[in-house]
Structures are given as structure tokens and as C-alpha cells.
Amino acid sequence: MARQIQSIERAAAILKLLSSGQRRLGVVELAQYMGLPKGTVHGILVTLTHIGFVEQDRATGKYQLGATVLRLGNSYLDGNELRNISINWADALAARSREAVQIGTRHDGGALIVHHVFRPDDSLQSLEVGTVLPLHSTALGKVLLAFGAEELDDVLTMPLERSASRTTVSSRDLEIELGDIRTGGWAGEVNELVDGQAAIAAPIRDRDFVVGSIGIRGAVERLCEPDLSLRRGLVTFVLDAATAISRELATPSPNHP
Amino acid sequence: MGNERFIAAIDQGTTSSRCIVFDARGGIVSVAQKEHKQIFPQPGWVEHDAVEIWKNVQEVVQAAISDAKLGVADIASIGITNQRETTVVWDKLTGEPVFNAIVWQDTRTADLVRELGSPVGPERFRERTGLPLATYFSGPKLLWLLENVEGLRDRADRGEVLFGTMDTWLIWNLTGGADGGRHVTDVTNASRTILMNLRELKWDETILQRMNIPAAVLPEIVSSSEVYGMATGALAGVPVAGALGDQHAALFGQTAFAKGDVKSTYGTGSFLLLNTGDEPVQSKHGLLSTVAYKIGDAPAVYALEGSIAVTGALVQWLRDRLGIISKASEIETLAATVDDNGGCYFVPAFSGLFAPYWRSDARGVIAGLTGYITKAHIARAVLEASAWQTREVVDAMQADTGIAMTELKVDGGMTANNLLMQILADALDLTVIRPMVAETTCLGAAYAAGLAVGFWDSVDDLKANWHRGAQWEPVVDPSRRAREYRQWKKAVQRTLNWVEGEGADDPSR
């Protein structure tokens, strides 16, 4: 068994103390409980405060659990739950855009499709729920990369695989594009996953965290202007749907217990 | 919004009233919703305040129209869909209800229903009405009011009071109330009174006599899609032009217009309706015969209905009572961790079995337990229970009609559960289709109201609005399907004869 790291054990002990009993404790009390010098405990508290795990009450100077640590246990959003909450908005997006709708979440270095609404033209289509799309060559995936920095390095260390004529294969180009996506709030994809296909996606947020992406996918000639720029009206539809779902996630409705 | 016009659909449900504004493509423009009080005066009794419901309906209609940034002039017509069988009687001159509305779930008429059936039994009026005598239906509830509200019988005989289900109550109030409001009921709601002759679509004189119900209190039976009257008040001038009971509206919203079309709505319980064309089919397998819809002067279209008491409610039970899951959607995540049920079957006969068994003496079982079974197997068995119960109703429908189904149209909250939809396709050996607009109940009411004013020209226009949102094909090996269905039926047998002293075949339970 590897050696235990003492400072982490001590930080965890502080969090445990703050999560039980009176929940608001001063440095002196914490030091007494733990049998440690005040300075040691204070140093740990400063670090925990810096990362948002602990907050200091301004009036009393006492410490309590921070919002970040409270959210840790809840921030994981099940894909099935996301589908449940999104289903009506995804239907509405398909109806307005007349294109197929997909919702993606991060999964094993890819974008897992957790919901799919057929393009409303009654052509033969099959359900793609469960398929994992590459992150760098899809609008759904690029949104997840742009707004969830922790996987960026993993992707950029592996060679970016080309699957179509306009796939981004240079990590520098991808980084620039992700910056644009963060600024613009949405991602586009034209001839990048499959030639002839285009897609638009936007982030779904659970308060601060991006938990998924929603977008439409269809033929380049329907989604794009003649100059291959994505049609603004469709982008607005996608952004509207993403905003509506994010709002629903932020305020749990009685319909989704 | 220019010249574009819209339809407002009111969904007066058991727990809330909603209004959805639809555009010409059947797309949702806005939604407003308000819950109302559930009143439980004693065990088995459930009431609503009809005045509160009327107030809420006015509020949600206003809210939905203003949320869509529309004015009354933009609304081409109003349609209504409603909780079925809930019964209200009110004063013709003041519009004041004489008693709270008695809700469909209310069982206060259990004894009354037994008396009415004797000595023939609950099947007494089935030939005429398509229904067995049971506590749900509104006729016995009306009779209870006549016998238990002081002075009501005399007032009814003098023609001072009016009876209606929620469609009737809302249409009367919308079209002017005491000041000239129309006293009508749509034929689908009328078919749930057990007072209407199913073939003639008229109040059945013989039954009215046997039940001692004065014809003067009854509304005029009208079609599901015609202009009943013009709204007054805040909605002045908008035609009130469509009404359908909720399950009938869902069938209509699914555009299940062809004989053999079948839909299943998955809520806390589930309702399957099969379009049987222009002839009512008398069920020999525990299903109800009902009117599917009637568009204006066109002949009525009939349906067979099968209800399942517990489907979504079993998932809630797992969450709230056992705590195996913390959110309803987790059932799918948990069940997907195993490939099969491990031999475990869950028959949720919590208050007996509905169609096609109608056994009030049955109680729930989990069968086939071994040390191998985990909570994931139980989660899977829970989902399979919805599928096998659907299969049994579908089998009864095929046995009654000889219609060979090829697909099942689904709607309701549980259709968000992909695994359940796949299990359903596998259990039924049918294609399962979810439409793009899952709000089929409201949509059906909107369609009826829109057809009546020429907003849509024909049912073909409506069919063009219907699009599949998702589709599941059966993939399971036929021998596995057959073996699991056999096991399910064995599990069902183990639920029977549990409650002592309660007989079989009592559809009122």
C-alpha cells in the first residue's frame, strides 16, 4: 500500500468536521479537535478556501463548507436523467429546425449520444443512442472540449484522426477553434466527421458546469449557406434549446423528480 | 406575429390544468400549468373544487396566450381535453356547484354499483354501453349526488341543476355560464358515463329509468369536433370547438385514424386504445368498448380500451418506498447494468390486476428470487413488468378483434426511457414508435378544435404533422421472448387468490 499523504488526510479531516455537528468552526476549535498547531490548520484552511471547498464567514471569522464541495456529490448528471429533462426541448428543436437532434455527454474520451430525435421527414432513420462520437471532429464533442478543460490535454496528446476533408488535425488549430467556441458559445462542424454532413451544437449547463451538449446534424446544403458558413437562424434555434434545458436543470421542476 | 394563427388546447387533468398553444404544424409555442387541490374527505373519497378548476383554467389560458406574445385575436379556436368521468352538478342560474366534483378515482359508489348490478352482475349494461358497472364511471357518481345531497333530487326533477363531466363544466362556463352557456358533452366523455347507448350515441332511456336519473340534468351529446359556441369574457369571440376525454385525445393526437392503429400512454398507469373503426367491438377479454372520437357529422369511430393500474407507479415505488434509486431516470441506468432479469419477475398487482384479468384478490409478487439476484435485476424486472402487462392487453385486443398489429405508438413520460422502449418492442414483437411531439393529449384536443374551424382541412393535414421522433425494433430471440412470457404468466398466477374473501372478476376494484 502506498504511503498516505498527511496534508490530504488533514484536509479531509477538516472537511469531515465541517460537515458534521455544528458546521461552523473557528481555527482554534478546529486545531483543538485535531490536536494540531493553529498555524498548520490555518495553512490548510487557506488552501481549501482558495479552491472553494471552504468558505470563511466574514462576520464571525468561522469556517464552513464551500459551495464547490457541496456540489461535488451532485454534479455528476446521469445521461438518462439528462434525456428525461431535455426530451421536450429536443423535440421542439427538431420541429423548428427540421433536422435530427442529438444530445451528447463526455464518456471515455468521446461524446456519448444519450438522446436522438429523428429528422422529421419520415425517412428511414435508426436510433444512435449509445454511439460514441470523436471529440475533435464533431460539434457536440468540440463543445464538450471547449467548456470542460480537463479532457483537453488527453485529446491533444493523441494524434487527431482525420475522417473527412475538413477534419481539424492540428492541435494548434483546434486550440484556436476551442477559444472561438468559448467566445461564441456554440460550435459548428462542416465536412469534419463525414463529408457532406454539418452540425451545430451548444453547451447544456447545470448551474456552473457544462454537463452535455445539444445540437442538430444534417446535410451541408441544408445547414450551411453557399459559402459553407452555418445558417444563423439554425444556430439561434440550437442556442435557444440549450438555454431552455440549462434553465430547467438550474431550477428542478416537479415534473422531473 | 403577422397573419399566423394558433390553437389553444386546455388539458384539464387530475392534478393540474394546463394550456398549450400550438402552431399550424402542431409545434408547441407556449405552455402554462397550474395545480389544484386534491380533497380527501375520507378513505376512498377524492374530490376537486370545480370553481377552483374553472379559475385555474382561465388563468392558464391567459398565461399561455400572453407567454406566446399573442392576443385573443390570434387564437383560431379552443379545444378541451379532460380527466374522464369526474362528475360535477351545478345550479343552472348561479353556476354554483352543489357539491365538490367527485373524481374518477373515488370509490364511494362501490355499494351503489353492486346494487345497480344485482342480480345480473357488473356486466348488466355492457351490451348497451360497452362498459362493466364500476366505480369509475360518472353515471353512478351522479346518482350518488342525487341520493346524498339534500334536496338535489327535487331540484333535478324541477330542472334547476345541470350535470356534467369536466368538458361540460368548462364548455358551459367558457360559452357564457348562466348567461346562455351551452350545456353539452362530447361523445367520448358521454361514453364514460355508462348512461349512453354506444351504438345510438344517445342517452339510454332504459338505463336512465333503471338508475332513476332525470334526463333534464343531462347535457346534449355532441361530436368531438364542432363549434360548440363562442367564448365570452376574456376570450370573447374565440370558438370553443373541440373536446375529447384525455385518452381519446392522445389517440387523436397520435393521428391513429385507421382501424387497427393502437397507442399506449405511459404515466403512473397506462392506457392502451385500439381504433376499431366504425363498429364498437364487445370485448370478451376484459377490455372496455368506447367511442374513439367523432368529427362533426361524420360517423363515430370506436375503440377498445385496456388499462394497466401500475406501470410508472412501480418505478416511483422503487424510488420512494424501497429507495433502490433516488431519481426515476436512474431505473434505466441501473437496469442497463445487467443483460437480463436473472430469472426474476415483478408483478405489481398492488391493488389487484386490471385488464385483462380484473382480479381484486391479487396482490403483488416478486417471483423467481435466488441468491444471485441483485437490485439491478429487480430494476430490470420492474421495466419488464410494464412491457409484459402491455403485451397482455395487446393480446386481449388481438383476440377480441382479430386485428394483427404491426406497431405500437407510445407517448407519456416513460417514453424517455430508452431501455424500456426496447424491452417493450422485444416483449410485443412489434415496432414501437415515439412521435416527435410527446404532448399528444393536448395536441389531440387542438386538432379537434382546429378541424372544426377549418384551421386544418382534414385528418390528412394532421397526419402530415405527425413525425416519428424515435423508433425501436424487436431484436430479442423469439425463443427467449416465448420463454420469458411463459415465466411472466407463471408469476401472474402466483398473485391470485391472495386477499381472502374477495372474489374474482369484480371490475369495480
Image (cartoon, grey):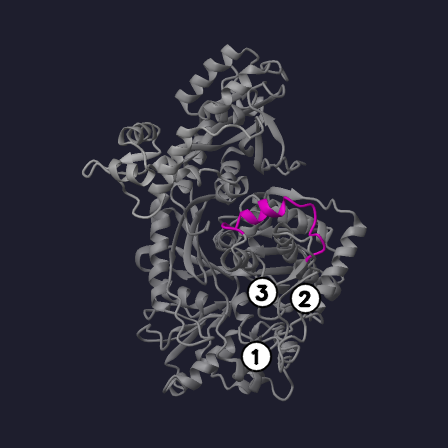
**Towards the viewer: B119 or B129:** B119
The x, y position of residue B118, in whole percent, is 61, 87
The x, y position of residue A239, in whole percent, is 43, 31
Residue at disc 3, secondary structure: loop
The x, y position of residue B88, in whole percent, is 42, 73
The 10 Å Cα crowd at callout 2, few under 14, some 14 to 19, many 20 or more, is some
Question: Looking at the picture, which amino acid does disc 3 mark?
Answer: Ala
A153 sits left or right of A22 in the view: right
Q: Which residue is mark 3?
A: B309
Chief secondary structure of the magenta span? Answer: loop
Q: Are marks 2 and 3 in contact (CB under 8 Å)?
A: no
Labels 1 and 2 positioned on one and the same chain: yes
Which residue does the image show at 58% across and 34% down from the upper left? A113
Tell whether position B332 is magenta.
yes
Tell whether position B2 is magenta.
no
Residue at disc 2, secondary structure: loop
Q: Can you say whether B83 is above or below B158 in the image?
A: above
Question: Looking at the picture, which amino acid does disc 2 mark?
Answer: Glu
Separation of residues labelled 1 and 2 (CA atoms): 18 Å
Give the residues drawn in magenta, as a range.
Answer: B325-344
Separation of residues labelled 2 and 3 (CA atoms): 27 Å
Which residue does the image show at 53% across and 80% down from the upper left? B110
Q: Which residue is mark 2?
A: B279
The 10 Å Cα crowd at callout 1, few under 14, some 14 to 19, many 20 or more, is some
Q: Mark 3 against mark 1, which lies toward the viewer? A: 3
Q: Which residue is mark 1?
A: B204
**Towards the viewer: B158 or B441:** B441
